[in-house]
Amino acid sequence: MPSATSTAPPALARPATERAGGRRANPWLVLVAVAFGLFMVGLDGSVVAIANPEIGRDLGASTAELQWVTNSYLLALAAALILGGKLGDRFGRRTFYLIGVAGFTLASVAIGLAGSVEGVIAFRAVQGFFGALLMPNTLALLRVVFPPKKFGMAVGIWAMVSSVSTALGPIVGGLLVEHVGWESVFYVNAPIGVIALAFSAAVLPQSRNSAATREKFDLTGVVLLALALLAVVFGVVKGETWGWTSAGTVGAIVVGVAVLLFFGRYETRVASPLLPMRLFRNRALTIGTVITALNFFVLLGVIFFVMIYLQNVRGLSPVQAGVRTLPLSLASVVASPLGAALTERFGPRLTMPLGMGLQAVACFVMLGWSPDSSYAVLWPPFVALGLGVGMVMASSSDAIVGNAPVEDGGVAGGLQATALQIGGALGTSVLVSLISGRVGTTLTGELASAGVPAPVATGLYEAKDAVAMGVAPVTADMPATLRTAVAEGSQQAFMNGVHTSVLVAGTLCMVGALVAATGVRRRTPEAAGR
């Protein structure tokens, strides 16, 4: 059908997108406006991990309920991201960005006022839905107002804001939880949201794909994609607790993939698809989507176990642990605009492999970490990881949104954000599962090597789940020498798991670098003019 197979050049497609002029056409003011919303969502994504233990204590929540505080948000966000981009393209990107900011802000306040873990879980899902309306339209708005030659730099700044807000989460969360209360990690969104709304209402232009308003809305595609993503993400986030080979995990993922394949086939047969399959004819866009997922697989997975290592193994407070990871944030500040500039000059074929290579180096250096490594050994991989993540964020975002037609900017932004969220969910679940598996196979031996008597070491195997979270199973009635031996053996077993995880993550980064280097071509002048 014509709309599903259109190959009209970008220059001809551009008039279909309405653009405002005057004061609302200032691209740098638009960048500042969307940065507020992006910062709010990025900060919230990582700050909640610090608040979860306190939420559990205050509301009497079980471990399973605390998992749903994170998972309900993630499921709603992942299921609705492409829908949010499509709604913006069709009905107005400014409109749905503002709706997203307002809803996200109100939901954040409601979480703090909920008073029960069930209320927190429900409002976290609402928060995730509105985040899905907000996020894809940030890149879509930039795609509309920035000229092609400056779009790469805009994406670099966008990536910097996203990376820094995510990396600052543990620091901000630690300070707020320690000195105010867990509710404050959600209340902090209120002033940011109010500023974002006021400023954005004043400077954002309205833009939409005017041709799309005359087309039939793909409601069936919305339902199919939401069901597919819900099943896949649900299987991924439950894989850690159910087991990756369990019937529930495998069944959910298989059903999700099957529905996703059916969705892809269905989208080629409708006149006005939710996600035009023609986008994936562009090799750079397709590889950029995969690399985006891998980028956040490594970032969020590594941050998760690094925070466990710093707090539970090294005994640092949340604030102290957050401060130790500052080199990661600072490196991403440098890398995002640098990556954008290099991408603009040489194309993502250089910067995506380079960023992936830096992350591989970071992971492989972590193989040298021990339970008592000095900070001089810890910070270099933080710098390499921050440089790699920032560089890949800039180049992969440019590869996805920069290679999509302007009228599909919201959908492309939703695609990029969906890949990011699924990659992050996979990273946390898979890497933590690898740590748990390795702890289970080495704990008894490490305890015995540390001097724990064999019968005691065998009995402590039941505490492997606690050890996988960096917690040594020591009790007050243990003799001091035994407590020391148990702590030493448990910490070494945990580090065995960390080493396995970073080895896998580093290998995946090398594969990603190879795919990007061989599969992405330098953008043609025609593509650059989109």
Image (spheres, grey):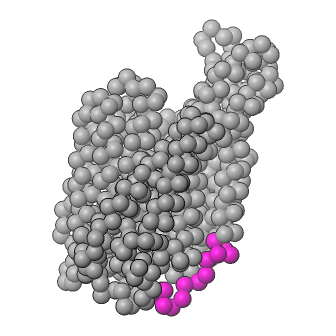
Q: Is 207 positioned to the left or the right of 423 in the image?
A: left
For the N terminus, the quadrant is bottom left
- In percent of the image, x 48 and y 55: which residue is there? 259
Q: Is 510 positioned to the left or the right of 91 in the image?
A: right
Q: Is residue 480 above or below residue 132?
A: above
Front-lying residue, 212 or 75: 212
Q: Is residue 478 above or below residue 354?
A: above
When asked about the image quadrant of residue 183, the answer is top left
Magenta range is 516-530
For the C terminus, the quadrant is bottom left
In the orientation shown, which residue stands out farthest toward the top?
477
Front-lying residue, 109 or 224: 224
When asked about the image quadrant of residue 500, the answer is top right
- In percent of the image, x 73 and y 21: which residue is there? 485
Image mark count: 0
Which percent across, then down, holds residue 510? Answer: 70, 62
Which percent across, then down, holds residue 504? Answer: 69, 51
523 within the magenta span: yes
- In percent of the image, x 21 and y 84: which residue is there? 21
Question: Is residue 82 among the parts visible in the rendering?
Answer: yes
- In percent of the image, x 32 and y 79: which residue is there? 145
Which percent across, then down, holds residue 424? Answer: 51, 52
288 within the magenta span: no
Question: Is residue 40 among the parts visible in the rendering?
Answer: no
Front-lying residue, 133 or 175: 133
Which percent across, then down, holds residue 91? Answer: 24, 70
Q: Is 184 positioned to the left or the right of 467 in the image?
A: left
